[in-house]
Amino acid sequence: MMKTNAGSTVLLLGLIFLLGCDGVARGQSGAPPQNSAAVAVAPANADWTVPFPGHRVMGNVYYVGSKGLASYLITTAQGHILINSSLGSSVDLIRESVEKLGFKFGDVKILLISHAHFDHCAGSARVKELTGAKYMVMDADVPVVESGGKLDFQYGDLPDGRYKAAKVDRVLHDGDEVKLGGVALVAHKTPGHTRGCTTWTMKVAEDAGTGSGGGKTNDVVIVGSPNVNPGYKLVGNAVYPEIARDYELTFRVLKSLPCDVFLGAHGSYYGMEEKLGRLKDGAANPFVDRAGYRSYVAEREAAFRAELEKQRAGQ
């Protein structure tokens, strides 16, 4: 048996999950999930609760997550934006990182997420309680977060995939902007991993003289998730029949985005630990990684297509 980071005890049932595998999902129907037999427990990773040094990525973008779960603080003179509340138990860790960087957690005015899986949004209700932040979520993920994960297409009937429900203050749609203090983030709907999975983009001007961009304006991309979790049915999915088509859309969107600074819902997407080790004053910012972004998207698309063909062949 294993104690999950969500705080409940589950049987592994012989199931091995990939490290860095993303969290939990289901559609807007009230019908019971039909994919749960394939995956008996929600994914979990020990690194999700391991503290990690908060750090400045570039400009006003800071990493404030754990070793395995990425959270980002976007600072402005009129308050801050937090992306990903992570686990319910993650909020204290995120707050500590924010405050160690010299900011006030209570100044968080807007809360965003990458997608409605418990490892990215289970702490949202508590963040709202502590800060009064407005919670803004992509349209197709709203029913999931407001049900506390019960309406997740893959793991909705699993206790480990559930969390405290949180009321959404603004329903987002593809292409919407979230603005605060002169900063604008754009919400790109990149569905499949969840119906409302969201990739965030913004422009960041690096301060001249830091060696991290020389004042250049950089395109930042925070990837929601293009991953196909173990047990996902891409063919013949009665709960989410358009899932394969949605993944196709996601890869078209990701390939269309200009990217200088590559970030994601998990630090493992973009090699966070290795890049942070190379971050030095006066040196080129390692988080500027255009080639790494293209390579990651291409590799994830190849993995999706291989799984899709495997499932088609198995019918």
Image (cartoon, rainbow, N blue to C red):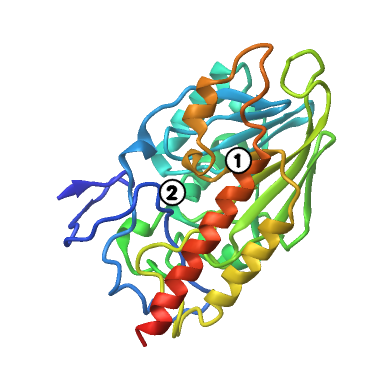
Check the image and name the residue furthest to the bottom: 315
Residue at point 22%, 60% (across, down): 15
* Disc 1: CA contacts within 10 A as few (<14), some (14-19) or many (>=20): many
Would residue 108 appear left or right of 22 to someone viewing this image?
A: right
**Residue pointed to by mark 2:** 119
Mark 1 and mark 2: Cα distance apart in space: 17 Å
- Tell me which label, 1 or 2, sits earlier in the chain: 2
Residue at point 60%, 14% (across, down): 280
Point out which mark residue 263 bears.
1
Residue at point 35%, 37% (across, down): 47
**Quadrant of image for the C terminus:** bottom left
Check the image and name the residue furthest to the left: 1
- Amino acid at dot 2: Asp
Q: Quadrant of residue 286?
A: top right
Q: Quadrant of residue 284?
A: top right
Q: Do the CB atoms of the residues marked 1 and 2 lie less than 8 Å apart?
A: no
Q: Relative to 46, is 229 above or below?
A: below
Would residue 183 appear left or right of 171 to someone viewing this image?
A: right
Q: Circle 2 — which element?
A: helix
Taking depth in this image into account, of 17 and 301 the one nearest to the observer is 301
Would residue 79 appear left or right of 143 to someone viewing this image?
A: right
Point out which mark residue 299 bears.
none
Where residue 104 sits: x, y (%)? 62, 23
- Amino acid at dot 1: Leu
Where residue 158 sits: x, y (%)? 32, 64
Where residue 145 sits: x, y (%)? 52, 59
